[in-house]
Amino acid sequence: MGIRIKNKEQIEGIRNSSKLAAETLKYLEQFAIAGNTTDYINQMAHEYIIQQGAKPAPLNYNKFPKSVCASVNDVVCHGIPGPYVLKDGDIMNIDVTTILNGYYGDTCKMYPIGIISDEAQDLINVTKECLKIGIKECYPGNRFGNIGYEINRYAIGKGYSVVYEFCGHGVGIAFHEEPEVSHIAEKNIGKRMREGMIFTIEPMINAGKARTKIDKNDGWTARTIDGKLSAQFEHTILITPSGCELLTDVYGEF
């Protein structure tokens, strides 16, 4: 059906859901500490989202069994919360998607657990910068390929690799909509951005090789093929007449 152009009412609904998703990530900071299990963090997230009159989109989505994704260390994305006990030195991504009044907001961020290595911190810093670089390409008339082109160019220049098996996506009316937003692309390819489009940018940056492997037991957990660290940040973005609005950056971190 092509890329949806959202109207004012839809944009406001998506903005509210995006705000809640961001607030959920902020709320979870207090629980992202050594000694807690990822399942406990999932429980806290689930209760918080429900208390706000919303629903967690991942729960039962294509049989995903939990309310958030919690991806630790070499897990690239779609980590299923469970009995794993966080320990000092871990890095963890929590990915939250909320459904509020039928509208979706999607965001994720990294949480350092205790004192982490310089190598892990550098990976986190570069990944956050990759998202910032992608956001700079978000304005009417620009082509979607330039997002991935600039992200990949920066990450490679810093000695990292960019995951190409997963991508950003349209969001708001449904969990996943058109377009697919690749984090690796050739320059000046793809459709042009237009006012009213809403989508995510969510680069996954690996310390080693770019490829991933899916856990055969749960069918979801994606890990780096070499066991090296991975990091990810994500925002939901609205194309405006003059540029873009970061719907999930309610704390001004970007």
Image (tube, rainbow, N blue to C red):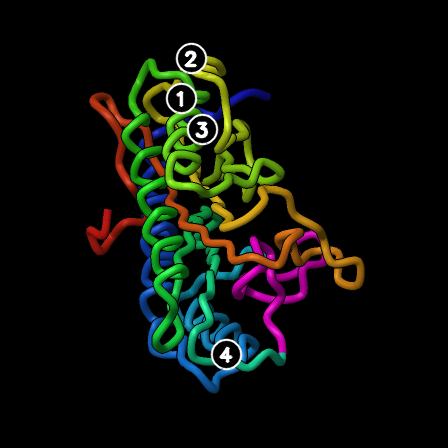
Find the distance from the CA under tag 2 to the CA under tag 1: 6 Å
Q: Amino acid at mark 4?
A: Leu
Range of magenta residues: 59-82
Q: Are marks 1 and 4 in contact (CB under 8 Å)?
A: no
Q: Residues within 10 Å of mark 3 (few under 14, many from 20)?
A: many
Q: Are marks 4 and 2 in contact (CB under 8 Å)?
A: no
Q: Residue at x 67, y 59 (%)?
A: 64
Q: Amino acid at mark 1?
A: Asn
Q: Is 137 on the left or on the right of 57, as rendered?
A: left
Q: Residue at x 62, y 53 (%)?
A: 224
Q: Amino acid at mark 2?
A: Asn
Q: Secondary structure at mark 2?
A: loop
Query: Circle 4 sits on which residue?
Result: 86
Q: Residue at x 44, y 32 (%)?
A: 152
Q: Residues within 10 Å of mark 4 (few under 14, many from 20)?
A: some
Q: Is 65 on the left or on the right of 254, as rendered?
A: right
Q: Is residue 117 above or below residue 139?
A: below
Query: Circle 3 sits on which residue?
Result: 148
